Image (cartoon, rainbow, N blue to C red):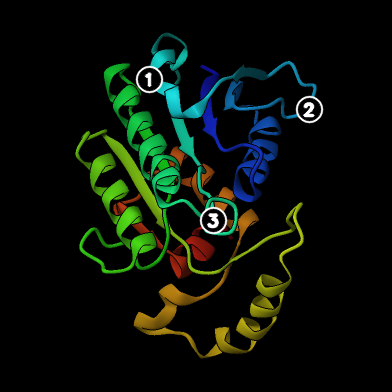
Amino acid sequence: MPKTAIILGASGATGSELLQLLLADARYSTIKLFNRSLIGIANPKIQEHIINLLELDKYADQFTADEVFCCIGTTKAKTPDKDAYYKIDFGIPATAAKLAKANGITTFIVVSAVGANSKSGIFYNRTKGQMEEAVLAQNIARTHILEPSLIVAQRKDNRILEKLFINLWKLVDPLLYGSAGKYKSVTAHNIAKAMLWLANNTFSDVIVKSDTISRIAC
């Protein structure tokens, strides 16, 4: 039977890649997008819900599907206020997981980040770690948390420093193997492919690191 998927963050680098994969995948008949603005793609599979994502809990009746893909995330540059940042990077995924559990959705796949640790002294890592704990606390049957390192993507905004860092990281990547493999860079396209693969295959790891993301995306 064709499936229904929810994407949170479909306008971002990873979410937009995932949307294209789902549109091309015959296993999915309906793709629900919860966004703050229209995605700008006309396709009969797409159902758009234009909402304030910080009030996601108000839309529980519409939050029904077979799978949830959460690609939500902001940056310090876009959201310098820590309270606002926390509401996005922790609040939205945590609320989505609660709604998924309440509505009987059995697959929840979310993008986090390498270094996520709820006890970290670094705000970004601590926020991601607390988000992971909140998601896992829902005990959704098929939960996978992807922890990419540096994400390589074609972005709409011009991030000069990020582009320089990506070019430098290409020199480092070949030196990262074994336990250091989790720090390998990974493309947004491969993150999206891995998310789709995890939703449709049995995989024992709940936490999926960068090198594993790239491996299962191939």
Let me know if residue 66 appears in the view.
no
Q: Quadrant of the C terminus?
A: bottom right
Give above or below for 77 relative to 44. Answer: below
Q: Residue at x 30, y 19 (%)?
A: 104
Count the marks.
3
Q: SS at mark 2?
A: loop
Q: Residue at x 64, y 79 (%)?
A: 165
Q: Position of residue 35 (x, y in %)?
A: 60, 28
Give above or below for 33 relative to 91. Answer: above
Tell me the quarter of the picture where residue 146 sits: bottom left
Residue of label 1: 57
Q: SS at mark 1?
A: helix
Residue of label 3: 75
Q: Position of residue 123 (x, y in %)?
A: 34, 62
Give how far apart the Cα atoms at labels 2 and 1 are: 26 Å
Three-letter amino acid code at the position of disc 1: Asp
Category of crowding for the residue at label 3, using alpha-carbon neighbours closer than 10 angstroms: few (below 14), some (14–19), many (at least 20): few
Give above or below for 144 relative to 103. Answer: below
Tell me the quarter of the picture where residue 109 sits: top left
Q: Is residue 210 left or right of residue 91?
A: right
